[in-house]
Amino acid sequence: MLFHSEEETYNWAVEFGRTLKPGDKVALFGNLGAGKTVISRGVCKGLGFEGAVCSPTYTILHEYPNDPPIFHFDLYRLEGGADLYEVGLDPDYLEKGISLIEWPERIEDNDPGITHKIEIKILSETEREIVVTAL
């Protein structure tokens, strides 16, 4: 899919979010500034969350009170192969909500049961190519 603006990307993410169900884990791949957090905001909106959504870079995890709960991870600051339990990716706990995982390549060796993979490629300042794979 090709998107020509942040708004188009966000609107798509709202619709995509409406398709998710408890236990889904969405991995967001893309360079800095690609739009991972824009997609996370849209997904949260699509799930009915009305609060502020920002990248949890310094805290690693934000849990948004919602039904179902939303777990928003940003693993950018972790070393590759990080232990999932140390960062809060307890599979039993996460099954009750939706997980959005930015920089999932930091845990590639410890697959947390990703259900959707979103790859974002920057084409220009405003254009993005997005490929979604359901696993």
Image: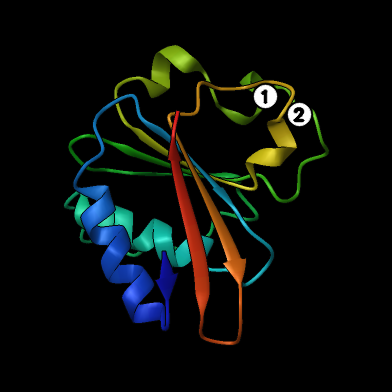
Q: Residue furthest top?
A: 92
Query: What is the quadrant of residue 39 in the picture?
Result: bottom left
Secondary element at tag 2: loop
- Asked if the residue under mark 2 is in contact with the one under mark 1, i.e. CB atoms within 8 Å, the reply is yes
- Looking at numbered disc 2 in the image, what kind of residue is underneath it? Ala
| Distance from Cα at disc 1 to Cα at disc 2 | 8 Å
Residue drawn at point x = 54 percent, y = 25 percent: 89
| Position above or below: 16 against 114 | below
- Whether residue 92 is visible to the viewer of this picture, yes or no, is yes
Residue drawn at point x = 71 percent, y = 30 percent: 108
Alpha-carbon neighbours of circle 2 within 10 Å: few (<14), some, or many (≥20)?
Answer: some
Image-based side of 128 in relation to 85, left or right:
left
Front-most of 78 and 29?
29
Query: What is the quadrant of residue 57 in the picture?
Result: bottom right
Question: Percent from the top left, x then y, of residue 65?
Answer: 26, 43
| Position above or below: 52 against 15 | below
- Whether residue 49 is visible to the viewer of this picture, yes or no, is no
Q: Residue furthest front?
A: 1
Front-most of 37 and 123?
123
Quarter of the picture holding the C terminus? top left
Quarter of the picture holding the N terminus? bottom left
Query: What is the quadrant of residue 7 in the picture?
Result: bottom left
Residue labelled with disc 1: 86
- Looking at numbered disc 1 in the image, what kind of residue is underneath it? Glu
Residue labelled with disc 2: 82
| Position above or below: 50 against 93 | below
Image-based side of 103 in relation to 109, left or right:
left
Residue drawn at point x = 65 percent, y = 23 percent: 84
Question: Percent from the top left, x then y, of residue 13?
Answer: 32, 59
Front-most of 67 and 115?
115
